[in-house]
Image: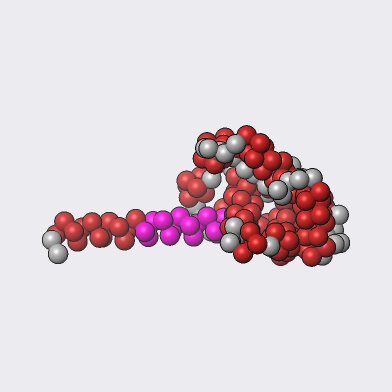
Amino acid sequence: MSGQETELRKRAVLRLSNTESNQLTRECIGTALIYLMNEYPFDKITVTAIIRRSGVSRAAFYRNYSSKEEVLREIGNTICERIAALLTEEKYREDPRQWYEDCFAGIRDNAEIFRLFMQAKLPPDFIFHTDRKKESEADRHGVPAEEWYRTIALQSAVKEIVINWFENGMKETPDQMAKICLELFQSCSFME
């Protein structure tokens, strides 16, 4: 192996270490914010308190985030992305009822985090944030308008149902919610 190849490998390891270090910093900041939200109203939590609780420097905080709201948005997006990633599995094409059930179970399993978001009095769109411009550029290519808008309507309807179910104490089981959604969306011709 040449000296140049050795140097490139060292740089790759260092870059990996920086990436891992940044990820750890972000996790510490997110964990600190969640911990503080269990103790204080969101509007009373300062960046300084997050920094103290997380053990990171102010520079490290601002290298990763511009505000405490951005930290909270990332936490919400991470949870939603995890749930969404699970729900893109092939098995759901054959069984949409199971998709709904697993979606509601995922929300229920992360209820404490969603409760903290609601207590922070942030709008639901803050939690269920999507970048419509990014989606339209990346995903709409070649999709007929009717199908595209049907998908948007379905996403919006599911989001509103999830929010209302959560705000009303999740009294119905994920199985019951799956049956409700499946019947509702099939009767609206969303699932054609």
Q: Position of residue 72 (x, y in %)?
A: 63, 49
From the top left corner, tell me how far across and down residue 152 is, in percent.
67, 41
Residue closest to the far front: 192
Question: How is the rendered protein coloured?
Answer: secondary structure
Judge from the rendering whether residue 93 lies leftward or rightward of residue 158; answer left or right.
Answer: left
Report the magenta residues as a range. Answer: 16-31
24 within the magenta span = yes
* One can see residue 148 in this view: yes
Which residue appears at 73% of the width and 61% of the height? 97
Query: In the image as oriented, which residue stretches furthest toward the left?
Result: 2
16 with respect to 70 (left or right):
left
> Residue 86: which quarter of the image?
bottom right
Residue 18 horizontal/vertical position (percent) = 39, 56
- In the figure, 164 relative to 147: above or below? below
Quarter of the figure with the N terminus: bottom left
**Identity of the residue drawn at 51% across and 45% down:** 62
Q: Which residue is drawn at 78% across and 51% down?
A: 186
> Which residue: 37% across, 60% down?
17
On screen, residue 48 versus residue 104, left or right, reads: left
**Residue 142 or residue 34, whichever sits in front:** 142
The quadrant holding residue 3 is bottom left
Q: Is residue 142 left or right of residue 149?
A: left
